[in-house]
Image: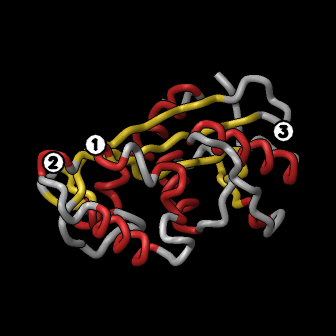
Amino acid sequence: MMNFTQLVLASHNAGKLKELQAMLGESVQLRSIGEFSTVEPDETGLSFVENAILKARNAARISGLPSLADDSGLAVDFLGGAPGIYSARYADGQGDAANNAKLLDAMKDVPDAERGAQFVCVLALVRHADDPLPILCEGLWHGRILRAASGAHGFGYDPLFWVPSRDCSSAELSPSEKNLISHRARAMDLLRQRLGLI
């Protein structure tokens, strides 16, 4: 069991900070890398794992504190796992609406039986920048791609991601319900076990 009273989250995303803090609980304070730097590292890895480790090491180097990074995205079966690690910038960095429009266009002629997808989350925790043994936790959330956006909650591809177990889109789930079953929730459950918080 490792004791951390605070971790630096390698993200400037306030929504992600809030979501992960809620999942982590009150015994560990999550601080934004934005307190220390406004510079984002280049995500040069070719996988979620590589990018999560890269971001965690960068945050630890800048802050001098143990750091947690999340690399996540959507992997669509029909598209060979795309947009994958490029999920956030699938439509050349033009934002969620453009990303969703591009995905709908790419999937427009794909039959329902071949619209399977999963949200992927890899959490990487490093004790220091040169930690030779990062803690890695992966969460997968299986669903399929809808033919049109549905729901007003969440962000990213949530309006296009059908959740079979709830018979609705991810964007139709309340934030608290999503935080119980999402890819990020699954990865965080594993991390909490590793940290002895469960």
Mark 3 vs mark 2, CA separation in Å? 40 Å
Identify the image quadrant of the N terminus: top right
Q: Provide the secondary structure element on which disc 3 rests.
A: loop
Sequence-first disc among 1 and 3? 3
Q: Please tell me which residue is depicted at 33% across the width and 43% down the height of the picture.
A: 141
Label 2 neighbour load within 10 Å: few <14, some 14-19, many 20+:
few
Numbered disc 1: secondary structure: strand
The residue to which callout 2 is attached is 164
- Is the Cβ of the residue at disc 2 closer than 8 Å to that at disc 1? yes
Q: Which mark is residue 129?
A: 3
Q: Residue at x 56, y 42 (%)?
A: 48
Amino acid on which the number 1 mark rests in the picture: His
Cα separation, mark 1 vs mark 3, equals 33 Å
**In the shown orientation, is residue 14 left or right of residue 186?**
right
- Look at mark 1 in the image and give the residue it sits on: 142
Residue 59 coordinates in the image, percent (x, y): 78, 50
